[in-house]
Image: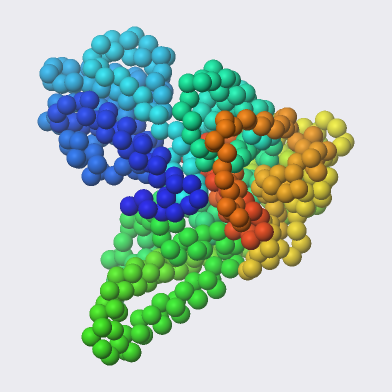
Amino acid sequence: MAAHLSYGRVNLNILREAARKELREFLDKCAGSKAIVWDEYLTGPFGLIAQYSLLKEHEVEKMFTLKSGKLPSADVKNIIFFVRPRLELMDIIAENVFSEDKMHSSRDFHILFVPRRSMLCEQRLKEQGVLASFVNIDEYILDLIPYDGDLLSMEYESAFRECYLENDQTSLYHTIYGKGDCARHVANMMLRMKREFAGSQNQILPVFDTLLLLDRNIDLLTPLATQLTYEGLIDEIYGITNGYVKLPPEKFAQKKQGEASKDLPTESKKLQLNSAEELYAEIRDKNFNAVGAALSKKAKIISAAFEERHNAKTVGEIKQFVSQLPHMQAARSSLANHTSIAELIKDITTSEAFFENLTVEQEFMTGVDTDKVNTYIEDCIAQKDPLIKILRLMCMQSVCNNGLKQKVFEYYKREILQTYGYEHILTLNNLEKASLLKLQTSSRNNYPTIRKTLKLWMEDANEQNPNDISYVYSGYAPLSVRLTQVLARPGWRSIEEVLKLLPGPHFEERQQLPAGLHKKRQQGENRTTLVFFLGGVSYAEIAALRFLSQMEDSGMEYIIATTKLLNGTTWIKSLMDRPESQIS
């Protein structure tokens, strides 16, 4: 099931197995039949760790979503609440417990906090008069969830908001080269913990040669731009949640001749996306313009493989063909799915609206007309386009211009509040606090210097056979990944002046390894760097880092970890102070 997690340079399946073991141990503490009441947000991350079959083996008979009021009926001995440490959830749990206590006095209640226990939450349960009802109160430290053979995420949805908006750095508790205030904070904690545990730690051979900590706010531009890789566009258009995507069903219907359209499915097509699927692993990081040719090539290979059956004459040849049949049928099904997804995406990427939006983004990235009111943004507001689309473009303009001129800023602000409602002043204020939107306070704009020195814009980026990371945005090289590339070779000392222009300190901490723990490196063996994005990372940045890992002369392999997988829409949404129904 999770073989793809162990294919990489570092076996990430070890983390999954450790998480499964802890889960089994907690379930076994609650002897007898069980019902789990889920905080809905946790079902996705837990699905990557354990399927229902594992829960069933440990006497889980029912599962419910946490909702206020009375729990659905279940003839079980134990009710277990799996929840995040949030005060508002404690009030719902109290309601559930009260309603159950009146009906089933013999039941045992348990609560499992994910990722850690909270004194405040326990205090709230005490105030509500239900704390004593719980037999077990425990924590399940589900920190880094393995998503793929080279990708880990904490899926901490409010990490960026807390770190950069509310100045609350408790989400950094877990996490050496680094850039940014949060990176420095994490490094300090790691070094302090190392000192405190000196002498009591197990001597383990290091898995990584280097740890690179990057603050999201050193590169605010990259997530705002529209991702142009296959996986990035799936996320931009449909949203990838915990490794799954839900797609419109029409393209996936098996239409038979004469079948009426009313019989077509109405339920979304749900697909899992990871490198366990051979074709997806091959095309996910390609620029979308190169995906059509890759699918066509794959179709010819599969077709030729099926044609081989006509050449199978002997019993041995027929037997060999039959043994390959399941793999070939799975490949054909995979090809059909990804051809349908590519068609859905192409319908959008070939539209005039998509092209106009992309053109404006690329003008901002190259420094064209960033200092005045943009007519495209003006038109979008007038047509009452989705607010997030407009905020992404405004933030891009602000970041590429080192802030907006007062006249431009006031104009945009006035237009948005008059068109979408004055309640959005809170969101605009949040974007200002996070430095995504700001007033220009000096005439000096550092972005052109950073862009030229680090070669962030490459004319004629090769989308089909890329030779630079800029292919992921068809010309723009993600700043975060360019910094990672330069660190490996020739080193950050070569760009000292540029690093000073970016927010927060940059630092290098060399840790002394005990004798006997130095790796004996084989000739030609690559070094391994863990790149940890504090505040979130996009799929396009992940694709760019994978590209660097695959470069023949790089000498470096990258494992990516993050507080959250994000795109421009989910990122801006996390900073909004309005319910979802109000923001599109």
Above/below status of 210 relative to 99: below
* Residue lying at 54% horizontally and 36% vertically, measured from the top left: 517
The answer to whether one can see residue 145 in this image is yes
Q: Report the side of 81 relative to 102 (left or right).
A: right
Q: Report the side of 299 relative to 361 (left or right).
A: left
Q: Position of residue 14 (x, y in %)?
A: 40, 42
Color style of the picture: rainbow
Q: Position of residue 525 (x, y in %)?
A: 58, 53
Closer to us: 67 or 274: 274
Q: Report the side of 457 relative to 65 (left or right).
A: right
* Residue lying at 47% horizontally and 21% vertically, measured from the top left: 200
* Residue lying at 50% horizontally and 64% vertically, measured from the top left: 282
Closer to us: 493 or 88: 493
The answer to whether one can see residue 401 in this image is no
Image quadrant in which you'd find residue 63: top left
Q: Which residue lies most toward the right here?
A: 443
How many numbered callouts? 0
Q: Report the side of 196 relative to 131 (left or right).
A: right
Q: Position of residue 1 (x, y in %)?
A: 33, 52
Closer to us: 546 or 111: 546
Image quadrant in which you'd find residue 336: bottom left
Above/below status of 350 relative to 104: below
Q: Position of residue 346 (x, y in %)?
A: 54, 66
* Residue lying at 54% horizontally and 67% vertically, measured from the top left: 291
Image quadrant in which you'd find residue 562: top right
